[in-house]
Image (cartoon, coloured by chain):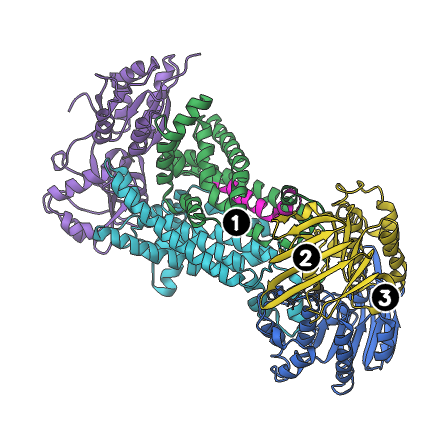
Chain colours: A purple, B blue, C cyan, D green, E yellow
């Protein structure tokens, strides 16, 4: 019995990619095995020549890292998904604010904190870029509580420990404990994209097929259901 | 009455039971190995609980199973010289000697007792470096310096040389007479017992 | 070394110190209970103490957040009675570190307490020493090897704690960003390896210092306790 | 319980068992060296053993990856000599768990070895017992409390290990996804709290089992060693 | 020659030095507490290293600092009865008795020696539950059963009652004569020494 390809994927894709793997398996293919972890850890495992087939990190940077070491199968890198960045507040303490140049985020926070991912993960870098381009970063920075990933930031907001937070639209959508205050303008940060590629050492024929499935309209529809934008357009 | 002891205690499958009253200054507890001598001393010191019985020393009630009296060991005023030494390994000899002196006279008799026991050279030493007989003498000194109301001595002179013994017996006699401390004394040496003891309690096997 | 890194180093030392200083007495009390007393629920207590070891650190951090957050029972209590909050504060970091270190400290001390020759405690009691004084002057110093080992383990664990800290009090430079958090950040960035290496070395030096101090203390405390034989 | 969860549970037990079974002898040897020998570099060895405690787990995981990856020295050696690789295998999980548990096991055992009355070893030698037999029949059984404590700590730590594992051998269901990794996954999912709670409870039950077993072992091993006094 | 001993060793600020040869079956080592008797036994047993000297027992060279000979303790064939007991707390009495028997006759004399020492009832007991004298007798049995080439006895009869002593002295005499084991014997009891010892070595203070 053939085994499915081994996919190394960013933790933030867990829900959607699991659903996609299920749908793919339902077509009669061997089910892909997906290992979810931080993109950085996965990239280093690939660098150590770990036996995997597909890589789906949370941003282009780690894909570049792997590509630079010649570990990708040429011609297989593609843009899979996009995402948006949103400002959220606890569902119980809504915040009324319009995201725009120089908006009063610092004032709205008061003595409270703004939870966001740390600079070291993509979500943190996008958030910082967005606030900077909107001209409020300097005022807000002292009030920032940095989490190791978006989910932890979300927990601070949900529990009311932070007055507001910056997370992906997909995460906000999934958490009933938070309310979206507003969506950051797409132009306020570089595009949020999730690439996919087949690894050079892959021998599993399922890798090609599963990659194709993810990029197909059926695959894209599943991601759309979880709030992701299609990587094929935009 | 110096000692009024009536205790029973089961240890494993052995029944230790003894009953005696002694008005003497020094009472000898005599009997073969395993007769229960150490156990009786432990019960009087309050570190082994009798199953039933009553203990009065120097007129003071220390234990009565029926009346529910059980004075804790630190309040009994025992000067207990253990069969197995038990110096505090983390304290030098001087600190061992003075450990109980807080209750007694604060160690004002330190020099005198150190002299009597011939342990002046050992004061700054650690117990681990003492010879068997040296450790035994320090243990005697520690008990004497703790200002006890009575003494329990479990073969205190075993392992001491004759010369030392000849010097120590008078000390014990003086403690017995001058300080009027009741002493319960375990020994296997009939001659020693005959010399010191006012009364001899025999524990059978 | 950047100023931010210096801040993280100093914070780590402060956290390590306070988590051990605060945690040791609690741990010793628990170790004593477990070594010497039997009571209903003893095994349960033992299990609860081991929890931070068994659960993934982020779960412990999340539980701390639930307990010490604004709306958590402990958090509300702290706020009502003392008007303080550990959320997003370095005190929260020390708390997380102490909780994570607790099982290690308790085990080490429990081992040493169990190794104490109880006949010596008996001797102390007959010399007029109350249970408390006996504890302080006989049990405690004889259990010192375990206390020292517990302190070293606790310090090292505190210096290395990451998951519970970031989940509980996030990563705020100057307030909650200890060395492991800074290291973790660097590790997430391509090309951060040099920083990871430098900060890791500093962590190692810190704990090496604790080790050296502990070995000296241990030697001092055992001075004279061993004879020359074999 | 889903089949995937069952798989994670069984894997955790397997990993816990093998990390302790493999780690204990190594830890005991190291503990003995540290307790009994003095040699140049002893402090260094002590420090290296403590590393997994001091460094953030992900750094330890990264170091393991560097050492045991296909191109790492240890990885190449394993491949050349035995034709095996621990990368992405459950054996790698056990290795990571053992490394993380090592400092805890070593400390516990070292404490107990230091508490062994060396006069008893001397007595054994005069009775014709070689150093090795003395070690096996006197030192080892007398140090049993530390061995048991080390085993429990090691098992609990192995059951809870997350950061080094996911960094070293990833998070592969059925192969490297232990309970903490499954918990971590659930923690990332909206509405995953119920799963987190359930899996955490299972972790706790597992370690409780280890605790009970260890207490029974400890009681058995100390049987008859304490007298009735006070 | 049973014993040819010439050793010196510094312990703290004390210099232990002794030199004697003894052809006797039983040689008594006599001297006040702290004279260094136990230290000499330790050196002969190989558990305390002399700073310099030479030790020959029963014709076999055990130690010679000049020739660089230092036979390890387990190969010296010592039957050492320690001043401080040292039973293995994790083994029952029977297992303690048989610990050294692997080297000896495998414990075939167990029943006989158990009987002589009167410890038949104690075989299944743990050392922690033994009385002082009981533990002492088990320690004697353990040494005798280990098939030693010679015996070192550090006050083996201290703490034993007279009746037991009267039964044990002939045992030692028999060991000395029938088994022809050289014995070095520390005692403070001059009478005991006079009865047993062929030669008496005095260690001064
Ligand atoms: N826990 C126990 N289980 C079984 N028997 C015990 C226990 N503790 C003590 N004994 C027995 O109780 C008896 C009395 O012991 P104790 O120490 O009081 O004797 P003793 O008269 O002081 O003897 P010795 O002169 O040898 O010191 C001994 O036979 C001993 O073996
Ligand atoms: N580590 C040490 N430091 C200092 N002095 C020591 C050390 N070890 C032993 N001594 C001293 O060496 C001397 C000889 O000790 P040893 O145990 O041989 O005496 P002993 O003749 O057996 O005495 P006893 O009859 O009291 O048992 C003693 O005075 C003791 O205090
Ligand atoms: O999914 Mo990530 O790599 O934690 O942003
Ligand atoms: Mg006795
Ligand atoms: Mg001696």
Q: Is residue E134 visible?
A: yes
Q: Is residue D206 visible?
A: no
Work out whether C86 lies above or below B198. above
Q: Which residue is mark 1?
A: D37
**Residue B21 relative to residue B43: left or right:** right
Q: Secondary structure at mark 2?
A: helix
Q: Which residue is mark 2?
A: E42
- Image-quadrant location for residue A34: top left
Work out whether D79 lies above or below A89. above
Q: Position of residue C32 (x, y in %)?
A: 57, 58
- Majority secondary structure of magenta residues: helix
Q: Position of residue E40 (x, y in %)?
A: 69, 60
Q: What is the chain identity of the residue bearing mark 3?
A: E
Could you tell me how far apart the alpha carbons at marks 2 and 3 are, in whole angstroms? Answer: 24 Å
How many discs mark residues in the rendered view? 3
Mark 3 crowd level (few <14, some 14–19, many ≥20, 10 Å Cα): few
Residue at point 47%, 33% (across, down): D94
Quadrant of the rendered image holding ligand 4: bottom right
- Pointer 2 residue Cβ closer than 8 Å to ligand 2: yes
Q: Which residue is mark 3?
A: E194
Magenta residues? Answer: D136-157
């Amino acid at each position: 019995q053939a085994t499915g390809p081994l996919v190394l994927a960013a933790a933030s894709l867990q829900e959607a990619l699991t659903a996609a793997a299920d749908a793919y398996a339902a077509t009669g293919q061997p089910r892909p095995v997906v290992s979810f972890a931080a993109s950085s850890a996965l990239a280093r495992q690939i660098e150590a020549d770990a036996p995997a087939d597909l890589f789906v990190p949370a941003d282009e940077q780690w894909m570049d890292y792997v590509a630079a070491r010649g570990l990708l199968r040429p011609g297989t890198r593609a843009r899979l998904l996009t995402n948006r960045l949103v400002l959220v507040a606890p569902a119980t303490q809504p915040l009324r604010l319009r995201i725009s140049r120089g908006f009063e985020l610092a004032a709205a926070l008061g003595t409270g904190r703004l939870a966001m991912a740390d600079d070291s993960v993509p979500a943190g870098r996008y958030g910082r870029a967005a606030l900077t381009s909107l001209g409020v970063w300097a005022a807000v920075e002292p009030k920032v509580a940095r989490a190791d990933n978006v989910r932890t930031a979300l927990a601070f907001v949900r529990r009311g420990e932070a007055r507001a937070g910056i997370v992906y639209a997909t995460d906000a959508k999934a958490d009933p404990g938070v309310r979206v205050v507003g969506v950051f303008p797409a132009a306020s940060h570089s595009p949020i994209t999730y690439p996919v590629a087949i690894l050079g050492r892959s021998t599993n024929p399922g890798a090609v097929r599963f990659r194709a499935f993810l990029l197909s309209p059926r695959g894209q529809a599943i991601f759309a259901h979880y709030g992701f934008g299609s990587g094929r357009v935009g | 009455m110096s000692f009024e002891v009536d205790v029973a205690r089961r240890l494993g499958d052995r029944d230790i039971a003894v009953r005696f009253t002694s008005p003497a200054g020094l009472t000898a507890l005599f009997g073969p190995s395993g007769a229960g001598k150490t156990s009786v001393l432990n019960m009087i010191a309050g570190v082994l609980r009798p199953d039933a019985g009553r203990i009065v020393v120097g007129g003071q009630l220390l234990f009565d199973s029926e009346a529910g009296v059980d004075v804790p060991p630190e309040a009994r005023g025992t000067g207990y010289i253990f069969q197995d030494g038990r110096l505090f390994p983390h304290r030098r000899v001087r600190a061992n000697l003075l450990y109980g002196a807080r209750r007694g006279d604060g160690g004002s008799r330190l020099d005198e007792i150190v002299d009597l026991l011939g342990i002046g050279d050992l004061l700054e030493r650690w117990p681990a470096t003492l010879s068997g007989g040296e450790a035994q003498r320090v243990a005697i000194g520690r008990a004497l310096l703790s200002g006890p109301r009575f003494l329990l001595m479990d073969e205190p002179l075993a392992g001491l040389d004759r010369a030392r013994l000849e010097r120590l017996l008078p000390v014990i006699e003086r403690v017995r007479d001058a300080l009027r401390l009741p002493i319960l004394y375990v020994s296997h040496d009939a001659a020693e017992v005959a010399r010191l003891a006012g009364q001899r309690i025999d524990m059978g096997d | 070394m950047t100023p931010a890194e210096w801040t993280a180093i100093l914070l780590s030392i402060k956290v390590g110190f306070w988590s051990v200083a605060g945690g040791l007495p609690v741990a010793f009390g628990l170790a004593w209970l477990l070594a010497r007393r039997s009571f209903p629920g003893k095994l349960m207590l033992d299990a609860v103490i081991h929890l931070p070891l068994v659960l993934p650190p982020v779960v412990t951090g999340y539980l701390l957040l639930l307990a010490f957050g604004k709306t958590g029972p402990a958090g509300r209590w702290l706020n009502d009675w003392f008007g303080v909050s550990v959320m997003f504060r370095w005190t929260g970091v020390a708390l997380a570190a102490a909780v994570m270190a607790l099982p290690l400290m308790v085990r080490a001390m429990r081992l040493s307490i169990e190794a104490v020759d109880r006949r010596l405690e008996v001797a102390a009691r007959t010399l007029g020493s109350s249970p408390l004084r006996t504890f302080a002057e006989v049990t405690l110093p004889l259990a010192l090897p375990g206390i020292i080992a517990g302190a070293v383990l606790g310090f090292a664990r505190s210096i290395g704690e990451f998951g519970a800290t970031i989940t509980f009090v996030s990563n705020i430079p100057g307030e909650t960003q200890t060395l492991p958090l800074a290291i973790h950040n660097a590790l997430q960035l391509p090309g951060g390896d040099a920083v990871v290496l430098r900060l890791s070395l500093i962590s190692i030096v810190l704990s090496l210092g604790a080790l050296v101090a502990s070995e000296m203390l241990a030697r001092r405390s055992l001075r004279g306790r061993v004879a020359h034989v074999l």
